[in-house]
Amino acid sequence: MTPTETLFAVLDRLLEADFRAIEPFLVPWVRREHRLRCRDRVIVELAGSYIGRLCSGRAIAEEMAKDLRRFRPRSAPASGKRALLQRISLLNGGKSIGAETIRTVLAGKRNGRRLPSRAAIIPK
């Protein structure tokens, strides 16, 4: 395991409040990478809610991208699928995510690299 992978393994285990306490002391690329890794985990988690209706990764990614484009955060606390959509929107800085980016995340890759902690979303 490289030092960078070790750093992110430690950051991934921190509670949200603990991470916020050390966040100002981290260099910008570490904060961004951590935020994107969190976003990717939430995308994988949300993909589970589409599996019963859709069977291909492409269809799941397109439907999820469509839902993210239509999503408008509300002040009331969200639950279930809305909470995951809200979390993705927050972690992505309020910007929409394209279907191709979602497909890449579901495939376990980003920027041409394999993600180290890929979670399986489709049960065998």
Image: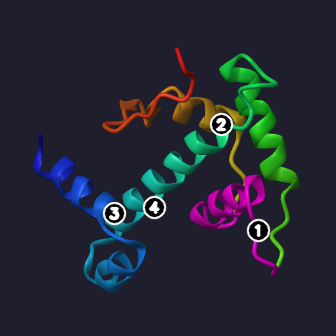
The crowding category of the residue bearing disc 3, from other C-alpha atoms within 10 Å (few below 14, some 14 to 19, many at least 20), is few
Mark 4 and mark 3 residues within 8 Å of each other at the beta carbon:
no
Q: Is 17 drawn above or below residue 109 in the view shown?
A: below
Please rate how many residues cluster around mark 4, counting C-alpha atoms within 10 Å: few if below 14, some from 14 to 19, many from 20. Answer: some
Question: What is the three-letter code of the residue carrying label 3?
Answer: Trp
Please give the name of the residue rendered at 26% of the width and 55% of the height, measured from the top-left corner.
8
Q: Secondary structure at mark 4?
A: helix
| Residue 98, percent from left and from top | 70, 41
Q: Earlier in the sequence, mark 4 or mark 3?
A: 3
Specify the quadrant that holds the N terminus. Answer: top left
Alpha carbon distance from label 1 to label 2: 18 Å
- Would you place residue 92 above or below residue 24 in this image? above
Distance in Å between CA atoms under marks 1 and 3: 30 Å
Q: Nearer the viewer, mark 1 or mark 3?
A: 1
Q: Are marks 1 and 2 in contact (CB under 8 Å)?
A: no
- Few, some or many residues within 10 Å of mark 1 (<14, 14–19, 20+): some
61 left or right, relative to 42: right
Residue for badge 1: 78
Query: Residue beneath label 3, please?
Result: 29
Q: Is residue 90 magenta?
A: yes
Q: Earlier in the sequence, mark 4 or mark 2?
A: 4
Identify the residue under disc 4. 35
Distance from disc 1 to disc 4, alpha carbons, whole Å, reads 20 Å
| Magenta part of the chain | 75-94
Sequence order check, earlier mark of 1 and 3: 3
69 relative position to 35: left or right: right
- Which mark, by number, is residue 47? 2
Number of the front mark, 2 or 3: 2
